[in-house]
Image (cartoon, rainbow, N blue to C red):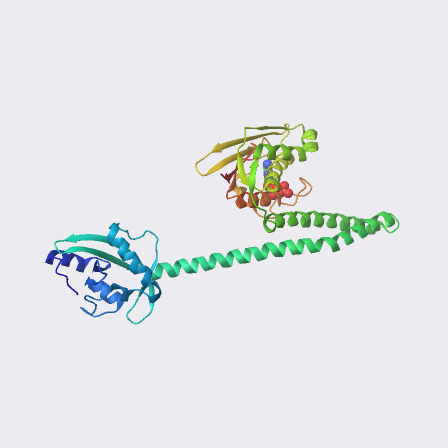
Amino acid sequence: MLSIDVLDKASQQIYDTVPDATIIVNTHGEIQYMNELAQSLFGYEENQLLQQPVDQLIPFRFRDAHTAHIQRYVQTHQPRAMGDGQILYARHQLGHEFPVEVSLSPIQSAKGFYVVCAIRDVTERVTIQQTLQRQKQDLERSNEELERFAYVASHDLQEPLRIIASFTQLLAKRYASKLDQEADEFIDYIVSGTKRMQSLINDLLSYSRVSTHQKQFDTIDLNEVLEQAKQNLWVLIEDEQATIESAQLPCISGDRTQLIQLFQNLFSNALKFKSDQSPVIKIQVKNTDEAFEFVVEDNGIGIDSQYADKIFVLFKRLHTQDEYAGTGIGLTIAKKIVELHGGRIWLESERGKGSRFYFTLKK
Ligand code: ADP
């Protein structure tokens, strides 16, 4: 190991045994000491770098910045801890580079001021991080492609489906009871099948629109959003003699149309899945550290808690068309909107005891 006369025997033994590669430099950036771990990490022989500039251990492109950094450090003596998240690059004697984390601490001896640099090779961690980052990007790209595909497919399918729907309806109108009974039945099946397909495709299109037509966020008053959602459902609310009670809601940064759609989807479900009492919907809000937490509570039929996650999945429904009409997209859209606003949505419910939909929106 390189030795340094500023270190007494005991200190040197300590530096020889620390689990990190350790180098001590003087204020000119010249190496005064390197423990064995540092020698093997950088590929140098004992004493090879004594009194040599520490720059040799740094890739060429970072050397100017490093000299400035050393000068600043000598003036401020500000210690830098390992694990502060800053990754630097070191240069091996053979020329290749590797990522390191470095901690710096000043020591004052009778001979002057020195800097102790502890260096940790973080190649493994950086490789894992890079792989994760790459996988995240791949996933994001493939999600975007899928969303784009769903949008284009549902958009382009609308036109041929419209033709099929109008001609089967024409067929039904003109030829009903002119063919035999079985033919009438077949025509009915085609008409209701096409209607169902139309509503599925329309809903799929509105789902894809949420993510593929992103707008800039504005400051939105949620009280106004709530009023608009109520107005859009006005006829249904009257028919069901429903009451909607809400606490005073905050303003957030968001997309107005999407937020109206969020409240509207939750309200229309509460009205659709009502119990034998008139629907009562209550909206509460809690101000937590990072977000506003909302709850939309109803007194409807409730949901078995085992389905609490499943109902947010695309096309997932718990009832047949005959029981309750729908496509199973409403809550998927609600979830997407909440996530695009930096929040999450979840359900607390028990069958027969109403549902409580919780969601957070970033402040
Ligand atoms: P849809 O209403 O078209 O079926 P959603 O995605 O909006 O689709 O809802 C999925 C399922 O979750 C519904 O089919 C229903 O079973 C259940 N659900 C949603 N909201 C409620 C609610 N407020 N009360 C009871 N069940 C609900």
Percent coordinates x, y for residue 97 in the rendering: 34, 66
Residue farthest to the bottom? 94
Between 211 and 174, the one lying in front of the other is: 211
Query: Residue at horizontal 67%, vertical 31%?
Result: 237
The answer to whether 89 appears left or right of 362 in the picture is left
The answer to whether 152 appears left or right of 56 in the picture is right
Percent coordinates x, y for residue 300 in the rendering: 60, 32
Query: Residue at horizontal 20%, vertical 64%?
Result: 36
Percent coordinates x, y for residue 95 in the rendering: 32, 71
Task: Identify whether 19 is placed above or below 253.
Answer: below
Residue farthest to the left? 9
Instruction: Specify the quadrant of the image occupied by residue 57.
Output: bottom left
Q: What is the quadrant of the N terminus in the image?
A: bottom left
Query: Residue at horizontal 58%, vertical 32%?
Result: 223
Task: Identify whether 117 is placed above or below 214.
Answer: below
Task: Identify whether 199 is placed above or below 152.
Answer: above
Number of marks: 0
Query: Residue at horizontal 48%, vertical 32%?
Result: 286
The answer to whether 339 appears left or right of 330 in the picture is left
Residue 187: in sight, yes or no? yes
Write down which quadrant ligand 1 falls in. Answer: top right
Percent coordinates x, y for residue 76 in the rendering: 26, 50
The answer to whether 1 appears left or right of 264 in the picture is left
Residue 318: in sight, yes or no? no
